[in-house]
Amino acid sequence: MITFDRVSKRYEEGHDALREVSVSIDRDELVFLTGHSGAGKSTMLRLIMLMDRPSRGQVTVDGQNLATVRPRGVPQHRRNIGVVFQNHQLLFDRTVFDNVALPLIIAGYDHREVGRRVRAALDKVGLLNRERAMPLTLSGGEQQRVGIARAVVGKPKILLADEPTGNLDPILSAEIMNLFEAFNQVGVTVLIASHDLILISRLQHRIITLQQGRLVTGSAP
Amino acid sequence: MGRRENLRRKEGASPSEANLRDRYHGWLQHHRLSAADSLLRVLDNLGPSLLTWLVIGIALALPVGLNVSLDNVNDLSAGWDSPAQISVFLQEGISADRGNQLEIELGAREDIAQTQFVSREEALAEFSTLSGFADVLASLQKNPLPNLILITPTDNLQGSSVSALRESIQGMPDVAEAVLDMEWLQRLNRIMELSRRLVMAIGLMLVAGVLLILGNTIRLAIENRRDEIVIVKLVGGSNAFVRRPFLYTGLWYGVGGGGLAALLVSLSLWYLEEPVGNLVLLYGSGFQLRGLGVMGALNLITLGGLLGLGGAWLAVTRHIASIEPR
């Protein structure tokens, strides 16, 4: 589903974020991506999201070589990927419902369909009764679940998460990870960047470890 | 079904993607949503929005108001705007009969379209009713006015030929003086032409100013919502999607400004109506001040809307593409 083939990324200031990374993630897999900060975790996610282009090598997502995606095609590409961010990236002047509905509005769904899908997604993350709330009135864990609902509402094949439990206590973190596992079980490919080794080593999934931009372990299932 | 299936493949749509018709509905829906949302935002910040409307309104009202004034002056002078007229004053002692005969002679000329003989008695009667000096004139022992023939040259006669015509008539034995009395009107026409150009130039400058003001206002709105734009782009919003609400914001600012300009022009005309009415009454003229009219107001609002869209477009194309998730 996601393939990195000898991918390097050097930023303009000369910093090598990724060096010759080759890794393949299968359909229906849940994979953790770990390493110290600056090891290249976020860079890998950014390349998948087309927020950046690799300096060398080739990234393939769902059978499409990302080098062939032109700037105009980037939004369409992103609509097929759900993303969860450490800092949630919610719109604080909109209700929970409107935040979750955003990807569907962008994709141009009919408003009845939007309502149905948003409620289904909020139900999955256990926030159905909070759809009229403003994000700032929610706890950190709840905000993160709104972020997850928004990421899955469009039923993407791929779900990316960048330090989704970064600001949460261990119990909330475990709950969030359980949610990701639940989505993985219904066929979503999940890639989670996290440095919480204690938490992720308890879960039985492949762990890809990066060190200074190089892949150290976990290159194959 | 096969065709729709093909289209979806071409677009690279996944099975979870809404089909084309739904997407068209969604697109329309987002237009409605953006329009309503932008309007609410404009109305929510009524203070600053009102200021923006006023700036645009005044900038548009100024040239439009001047133009309406020129239209009125034009209306006023249209009655005098016939081709230049030559007043031919006959020598003293020439009788009315001779004057009539001369009128017929002149009327036969090819370069003269129309002639009118005004006897000195008629001239005196007309002068005393129009001038308000009836008492003074009645006290005169002798009519001081000469017999007069008014001549209208043919339409196709150019300025210099009219002068030549005047000179040839001036040279006739019974004629005391031939006066081309429309020179001042020609001057007025030149001045009007010049004024139109000036108003045009001022208008163009103000329109450019409006565009820049709107562009700047929209740029600030974009900066204020930078975080939101980043998030929308992260979850797959295209540039067009992000642009839409800002274009509507520009449209509302422009429409409001245009409406305010129409209001300002109407108010000033209303303010001027009474003194102008009093003035023309003194001249015994039936002139009436002409306003913008409904069409004029609608045109002004449309112009405002177009300028709003244009200004927003300037800002949006320059700034939105440069806001990318980092």
Image (cartoon, rainbow, N blue to C red):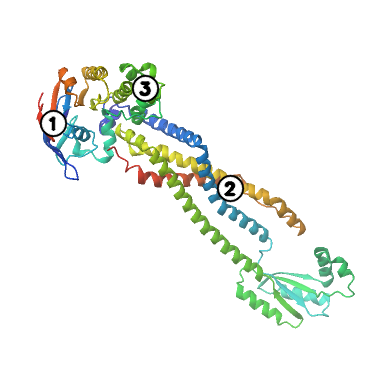
Mark 2 or 3: in front is 3
Q: In which quarter of the image is the N terminus of chain B?
A: top left
Vertical placement of residue A31 versus A38, above or below: above
Disc 1 marks which amino acid? Answer: Leu
Residue for point 72% across, 51% down: B274
Tag 2 and tag 3 share a subunit: no
| Element marked by disc 2 | helix
Picture disc at residue A54: none
Q: How many numbered marks appear?
A: 3
Residue for point 26% across, 36% down: A74
Left-right relation of B243 to A77: right
Residue A50 x/y as whole percent = 23, 36
Comparing B117 with B126, the one in front is B126
Picture disc at residue A210: 1
Can residue A168 be seen in the rendering of this structure?
yes
**Which residue lies under the disc numbered 3?**
A138
Residue A197 x/y as whole percent = 16, 23
Disc 2 marks which amino acid? Answer: Gly
Tag 2 and tag 1 share a subunit: no
Quarter-wise, where is residue A158 in the image? top left
Disc 3 marks which amino acid? Answer: Leu
| Element marked by disc 1 | strand
The reply to whether discs 1 and 3 touch (Cβ–Cβ < 8 Å) is: no
Left-right relation of B117 to A138: right
Q: Residues within 10 Å of mark 3 (few under 14, many from 20)?
A: some
Label 1 marks a residue whose chain is A
Marks 1 and 3, the one that precedes in the sequence? 3
